[in-house]
Image (spheres, rainbow, N blue to C red):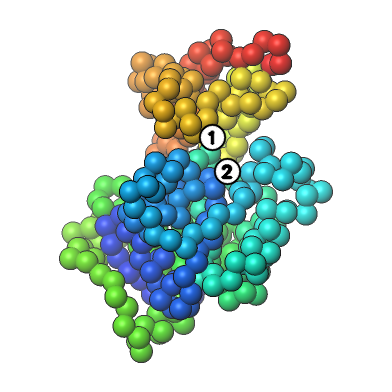
């Protein structure tokens, strides 16, 4: 399932811990200290993992705790390109920037990416992005860490998202779907070459509940079910259907700026103006506790018995991989009705 040669494992109890271990492995293996992350990212809540998180949760907590050495790169986010460019004439500048960033920063141990961004908008990169990032990191002997805590285990129509682009990272982290989310288990996978470094060098990491037998057993059962039910292929098929239905919904609602996704992982980006692409709310609104339009839409859905994650100014759709087509249709019908809440707040002068 994991791309070769990722065959050496450290087991923990969460995605956060998996990333914490990955960051420590990268720094210890290379002897370097800096890590490149991206602004629209979430990698966990402990000291190192929150420090490489780009979004608002880091901004809130970093006054209390922060591990130094993180630098942030722009995202491959075409709907809101940080360079103001348009794909494909952009030459994938968001990747090329990383080449210069590593050169100018120096002392870079690793780059950590969510191959498909999770909570922060299910942002699917353009086809050239991750292969180019892999080329750049390899050229500079910088380790590439793929955080597949959300995107792994069939969520995006492959066992792991990196498989879509035939990219093999040096370290891959995952959790959640490894046990079908029924038991707490995190996994940090790496290569024999990196593993062997620590046969001659002390690795100062570990905790009481690493490799817990009670949660390793559910992982075996979950993998058997993924295979028995052919859930990876089902996610791919259902994902195509989901994205098609979301595009139909988008056409009916002026508050929907963009829909995007891969497999059974999608986002609906809400805007008060399609012309300007201005979001209803910002991270500052979330931090300040102001009412969010995305939350209002999610609450309207909840009243009809459908739970949907809302975050700042978008909705995240990630149903169980075993969802039936009828259940998926019902959820989409509820979303369709709930979006009138956002439509009512669209700026009529620019919609």
* Image quadrant where residue 300 sits: top left
x 38%, y 16%: residue: 304
Residue appearing at x 54%, y 16% in the figure:
342
Quadrant of residue 287 in the image?
top left
Q: Give the residue displayed 36% in from the left and 89% down from the top.
A: 200
Which residue is more in the foreground, 187 or 85? Answer: 85
Closest to the observer: 25 or 31? 31
Q: Earlier in the sequence, mark 2 or mark 1?
A: 2
From the top left corner, tell me how far across and down residue 171 is, in percent: 46, 68
**Image spot of residue 67 (x, y percent):** 39, 60
Element under disc 1? strand
The answer to whether residue 176 of the structure is visible from this angle is: no
Could you say which quadrant of the image residue 8 lies in? bottom left
Relative to 66, 247 lies left or right: right
**Across the whole image, how many numbered discs are drawn on residues?**
2
Residue labelled with disc 2: 123
Q: Residue at x 52, y 30 (%)?
A: 282
Q: Is residue 142 left or right of residue 101?
A: left
Residue corresponding to mark 1 = 267
* On-image quarter of the N terminus: bottom left
Percent across and percent down for residue 39 are: 54, 48
Asked if the residues shown at circle 2 and circle 1 are in contact, with their CB atoms under 8 angstroms apart, the answer is yes
> In this view of the protein, can residue 114 be seen by the observer?
yes
Vertical order, 154 against 34 (above or below) = above
Relative to 88, 261 lies left or right: left
């Amino acid at each position: 399932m994991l791309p070769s040669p990722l065959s050496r494992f450290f087991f923990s109890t969460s995605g956060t811990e998996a990333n914490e271990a990955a960051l420590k492995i990268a720094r210890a293996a290379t002897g370097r200290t800096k890590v490149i992350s991206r602004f629209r990212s979430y990698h966990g809540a402990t000291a190192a993992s929150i420090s490489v998180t780009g979004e608002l949760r880091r901004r809130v907590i970093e006054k209390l705790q922060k591990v130094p050495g993180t630098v942030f790169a722009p995202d491959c986010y075409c709907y809101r390109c940080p360079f103001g460019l348009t794909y494909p004439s952009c030459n994938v500048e968001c990747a090329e920037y990383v080449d210069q960033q590593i050169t100018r920063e120096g002392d870079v141990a690793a780059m950590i990416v969510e191959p498909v961004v999770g909570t922060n908008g299910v942002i699917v990169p353009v086809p050239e992005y991750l292969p180019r990032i892999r080329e750049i990191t390899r050229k500079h002997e910088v380790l590439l860490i793929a955080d597949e805590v959300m995107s792994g285990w069939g969520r995006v129509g492959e066992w792991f998202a990196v498989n879509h682009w035939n990219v093999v990272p040096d370290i891959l982290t995952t959790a959640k779907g490894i046990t079908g989310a029924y038991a707490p288990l995190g996994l940090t996978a790496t290569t024999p070459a990196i593993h062997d470094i620590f046969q001659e060098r002390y690795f100062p990491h570990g905790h009481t509940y690493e490799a817990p037998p009670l949660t390793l057993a559910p992982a075996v059962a979950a993998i058997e079910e993924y295979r028995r039910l052919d859930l990876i292929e089902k996610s791919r098929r259902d994902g195509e259907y989901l994205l098609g239905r979301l595009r139909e919904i988008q056409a009916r609602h002026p508050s929907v700026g963009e829909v995007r996704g891969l497999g059974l992982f999608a986002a609906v980006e809400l805007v008060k103006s399609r012309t300007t692409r201005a979001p209803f709310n910002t991270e500052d609104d979330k931090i300040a506790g102001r009412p969010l339009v995305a939350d209002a839409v999610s609450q309207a859905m909840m009243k009809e018995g459908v739970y949907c994650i809302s975050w700042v100014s978008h909705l995240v759709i990630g149903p169980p991989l075993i969802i039936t087509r009828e259940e998926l249709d019902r959820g989409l019908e509820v979303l369709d009705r709930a979006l009138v809440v956002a439509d009512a707040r669209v700026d009529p002068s620019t919609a």
